[in-house]
Image (cartoon, rainbow, N blue to C red):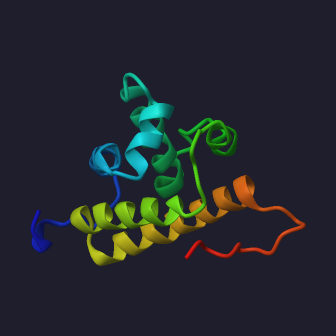
C-alpha cells in the first residue's frame, strides 16, 4: 500500500485488516510467536474475531468487546514485561503500513495505554519500584 493509499479513517473493515496483518507478524516473530502459539495452539479465528471486537470497542466505541484482557493475559505462559515493547513495535509498524500518520498515532496512543495497563496488572507489585529495571 503506497502512502497515497493509506487509510484515513477507522472502520470495521480497516480494523479487520489491521488485526489480520498484525497477528500474521506475531505468528512468525521469534520472540512473540512461540508465546502466542502456546496460548493459541489451534484455530486462530476465534482470537482474531475477539480482537476485531476489542479494537472496534477501543477505536469506534462500538461496545462489541466482552471480555477480561487481564484475566486472559494472567494465563499466558512465558509472558514477560520486556515483550510488550516488541508487541508495540510490531503493532506500530503494522499501523504505519495501513493508516495515515494521524490514525497511526491514534492507534499507537491507545495501544500504549492498553499495554501499560496490562503491564501494571500483570507485573506491578507495591513493594517493588515501578517501572522495574530492564535487563541489560
Instruction: Determine the residue positioned at 72% across, 58% down.
Output: 123
110 shown above or below 76: below
The quarter holding residue 105 reads bottom left
Provide residue 92's location: percent of width, then percent of height: 36, 67
Instruction: Determine the residue positioned at 45% across, 30% down.
Output: 40
Left or right side of 52 for 63: right
Residue extending farthest to the top is 42
Q: Front-most of 124 and 134?
A: 134
Q: How many marks?
A: 0
Provide residue 71's location: percent of width, then percent of height: 69, 39
55 shown above or below 71: below
Q: Quadrant of the N terminus?
A: bottom left
Instruction: Determine the residue positioned at 27% across, 69% down.
Output: 96
Q: Quadrant of the C terminus?
A: bottom right
The quarter holding residue 69 reads top right
Instruction: Determine the residue positioned at 61% across, 35% down.
Output: 66
Residue extending farthest to the right is 127
Q: Front-most of 35 and 73?
A: 35
The quarter holding residue 48 reads top left
Q: Front-most of 99 and 36?
A: 36
Provide residue 81's location: percent of width, then percent of height: 60, 60
Provide residue 21's location: percent of width, then percent of height: 27, 49
Q: Front-most of 52 and 30?
A: 30
Amino acid at each position: 500500500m503506497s502512502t497515497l493509499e493509506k487509510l484515513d479513517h477507522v472502520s470495521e473493515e480497516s480494523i479487520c485488516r489491521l488485526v489480520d496483518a498484525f497477528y500474521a507478524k506475531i505468528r512468525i516473530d521469534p520472540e512473540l510467536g512461540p508465546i502466542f502459539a502456546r496460548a493459541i495452539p489451534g484455530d486462530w479465528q476465534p482470537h482474531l474475531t475477539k480482537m476485531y471486537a476489542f479494537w472496534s470497542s477501543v477505536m469506534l466505541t462500538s461496545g462489541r468487546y466482552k471480555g477480561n484482557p487481564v484475566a486472559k493475559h494472567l494465563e499466558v505462559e512465558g509472558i514477560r514485561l520486556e515483550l510488550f515493547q516488541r508487541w508495540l513495535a510490531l503493532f506500530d509498524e503494522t499501523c504505519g503500513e495501513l493508516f495515515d500518520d494521524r490514525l497511526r498515532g491514534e492507534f499507537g496512543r491507545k495501544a500504549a495505554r492498553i499495554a501499560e495497563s496490562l503491564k501494571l496488572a500483570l507485573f506491578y507489585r507495591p513493594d517493588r519500584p515501578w517501572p522495574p529495571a530492564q535487563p541489560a
